[in-house]
Image (cartoon, grey):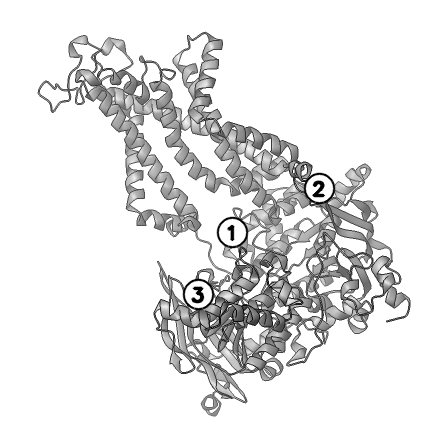
Amino acid sequence: MSGRDIDVGDAPPVPLQVASPGRLARWRDSDLLASFLGSKTAMAALLATVLMVGLAVAAPLISPQNPYDPAQLDLINSNLPPIWQADGQAPFYLGTDDQGRDVLSAVLYGLRLSLIVGVLGVITSGVLGIALGLVAGYAGGALDTLIMRVADVQLTFPAILIALVVDGVARASFGGALDVGPLIGLIVISIGLSFWVQYARTVRSSVMVEKGKDYVQAARLIGLTPPVILVRHVLPNVTGPVFVIATINLALAIITEATLSFLGTGLPETMPSLGTLIRTGNRFLFSGEWWIVAFPGLALAGLVIAINLLGDWLRDALNPKLQ
Amino acid sequence: MSAYVEVTDLRRLFDVSKPWLNRVIEREPRRFLTAVDRVGFTIAKGETFAIVGESGSGKSTVARMVVGLLPPSAGEVLITGISMTDPREAAARRRLRSRIQMIFQDPYASMNPRWRVGKIIAEPIRAFNLIQGEGAIRARVGELLGLVGLHPDDSKKYPHEFSGGQRQRVAIARALASQAEFLVGDEPTSALDVSVQAQILNLMRDLQDRLGLTYLFISHNLAVVRHMATRVGVMYLGRLVEVAAAKDLFARPRHPYTRMLLDAVPDLAHVGRARVPVSGEIPNPIDPPPGCTFNPRCPLANDRCRTEIPALLDGVACHAVQEGRA
Amino acid sequence: MSETILSVRDLTVAFDTRRGPLTAIDRVSFDIGRGEILGVVGESGAGKSVTGSAVIGLIDRPGRIAGGAIHLRGERIDNLSPEAMRRVRGKRIGMIFQDPLTSLDPLFRVGDQIVETLRAHTKLSAKAARTRAIDLLAEVGIPAPERRIDGYPHEFSGGMRQRVVIALALAAEPELIIADEPTTALDVSVQAQIITLLKRLCREHGTAVMLVTHDMGVIAEAADRVAVMYAGRVAEIGPVAAVVREPHHPYAVGLMGAIPTLSQEADRLSQIPGSMPRLTAIPKGCAFNPRCPKVFARCRIERPEPILVGASRVACHLYDVTEKAA
């Protein structure tokens, strides 16, 4: 009889005709929006994320230089400090590296690559995990056991180790000379294979709850087949937690890519992501050119923190029981 | 009158064993729970057959086997002479499928919360390809909503915008959408408030009169069953202990369990009544008593009741009744 | 009536939401005398459980008592500090909830839980408390209490668990027991046992009981008086026989007619159109007016105050003598 489970009355008043509010009105009236407007952290995190994504998308338009084009680099401009220091020069606001590459441009393009790889990695792991989770949860039995035991085993390895193994095996079998396109694909697959377990587990447990519900039984009664029931009825009702995982995993995927690149198995120096920039910049840390590593590092940290805060808020907002 | 539904020797076991590894380590055998044990009955076209029982009686399991949501471990369900289990009759069963629908207990869980009501009701129409053309389907959905006392414009709303009773009306509209003639209601009103329950019970009776529906009505509420049923089967721990016309069952209950149940129900007519306390509780169905499962609570039990399972003869499964001791 | 144990006057409970406060309980008044069982009945959303929570001081934020007074034996308890209220709750007010499993700690033997309660609120020694606990278990009808006292909650059946909860509620010899749906989770045959037990114990101990339930049958059998709640207000309060057999408030009349009974067969149940209003949309004037068959102009404007009609108090303008004279 706690006050919390108060029944606020489940019925509209007598006239059965109540205008159903449109989608926009429902969203404006929703608890999610109220929770968002009530959380300064969430608003700041969203602002920061949107800003970074915007910068990344607009990188080719706003960058002073195309850092991937060797013709635009000039060794005369090498190792310039940021603009506010004594030797700073426009337009190299954040300084340059030893090749004369503009750090600001490199960071913007690196942000772009990091986000592309992260988003694609999240999509890959999500699709893989959701599909396996749906099948495991709905089919049950031996198939469920098989999928979930593989997931258990995979969980005992750190994600980065799996990514390194996938990456190593692929490079060995393709002879090491990969183009940038296939290389990005390879990293995306590595990330996908490292992160699917969490989706699969969450989706599986949601499916096991949903499949016992009567609306799934009602769908079976009209003779719908399991794949149709899964896609049409079960999937839309298990997506809430998936969004939370996807947001938090986006941050993890970006870090994983950065780590792979930092370890030298990621993107090459000719087409650097934030991780590659940090690796190359690391070499100059002790010779005084701190800006080469600091700005990519700050960009990576900012992006990951903003996305993480957003994910935390989303988790709390969608799951009031955790508060 | 030939039977519309014919259920014979229906049995259902559930595997309640521990996982394989635990069984091997702890040297335990597999364990089975007999949820339904040799249940048989018939339902005539246009009548309401009710199965009443307390928790663990297996009444919902019977309902799910009758509509084909759960395969029986043994026994047979024939509907209009077509087997619901025989794989050789799969084609005939597919045609029968649209005529059998179910109304579930919880109107909050029986509808996809992300679909509008119009889409929910239209789904069976589309699945069975009953009507072609969006306009015609929309008109049919509106007609069905009117039939259950809602407004055609309600099709634009989501389930959560309705009260429990209104949602149960939507569930009935969906059940009727496939032109069903046999509806199985699994506790269709037990999640509802009494004033709303009356609306739904009245609606179900009106629809039966107008459309000639046949009902299998599952409930734990004897008063509701008395109001709805033409014939009643009483279940206890997976077995049918008594089957009789509703009038006879409530006027002259024969099985000691039915008598006890009728005596125990709190009822409006019993204001301030001093009651004869009923002893005992329902045993664990995993480990039921031998013989007649009711024997530990039965005032008429003797040695035969404790060893021999009574058969359902002349509508009652009780040694004491059959021997003339009751 | 004998000595008044609980007196509730104009109790108002509001829940603060981001769209403003919602009044869940609106000026509810009632008394419970020594050894008396007051049934509080209503459909979901009527506010019956919130009323119980308010009496025991368990309204959590965002809810708050927004007005009125609660007196226990003349002592005001609605404005006590949480700490003082906690003492009152254990010692002077006992509680029985719907699910016995939530009231019993699964990790402790039932005997230890009763002994703990006894020692917290009385000056009994450990040994004396154990003897008293065995007596209590025997009193609530647990067979072989000297053995079962060392059992864990999961070793008891549902009905036996609820008996243990009753023993626990009675342990400190409280003046008042709040029982919120105490039989709802139990099978009908067990429900009757619990009702009988509750009735007997209250009479013997002189405990006042507030029995909150949606089940009119349970009220009819257990309660001495009954308060029928609607939309957070008391529609009618009076002796149970009067309210059940001759209800006055149109809502109570509709409610009684909507309940199917075992004793008589009605072709149609009387039904109240529509459903309980949401807290966000409680109609002006009498909250029941949009559903009332006897509504007239005054009902839509002015909220009716309780009027003495026979032995009952009815909040309905129909019974206002000045209205008839006019």
| Residue C120 x/y as whole percent | 45, 68
Residue C290: x and y in percent read 49, 71
> From the viewer's perspective, is the residue at label 2 or at label 1 nearer?
2
Residue linked to disc 1? B158
Percent x, y of residue C217: 63, 73
Q: 10 Å neighbourhood of mark 1: few (<14), some, or many (≥20)?
A: many
Identity of the residue drawn at 40% across and 68% down: C86
Q: Which residue is mark 3?
A: C279
**Residue at image x 61%, y 45%?**
A216
Q: Is residue A231 left or right of residue B239?
A: left
Which element is circle 2 on? loop
Q: Amino acid at mark 1?
A: Tyr
Q: Nearer the viewer, residue A91 or B134?
A: A91
Rendering coords of residue B93 (x, y %) = 77, 42
Q: Are marks 2 and 1 on the same chain?
A: yes
C287 or A40, nearer to the observer: A40
Q: Earlier in the sequence, mark 2 or mark 1?
A: 2
Above or below residue A128? Residue B213 is below
Q: Give whichever of A261, B179 is nearer the camera.
A: A261
State if disc 1 and disc 2 touch (CB < 8 Å).
no
* Residue type pointed to by label 2: Glu
Please determine whether, in this image, residue A304 is positioned above or below residue A37: above
Dot 2 falls on which chain?
B
Residue placed under numbered mark 2 in the picture? B28
Same subunit, labels 3 and 2: the answer reads no
Observer-nearest of A111 and A57: A111
Look at discs 3 and 2 and give the one toward the viewer: 2
Q: Chain letter of disc 3?
A: C
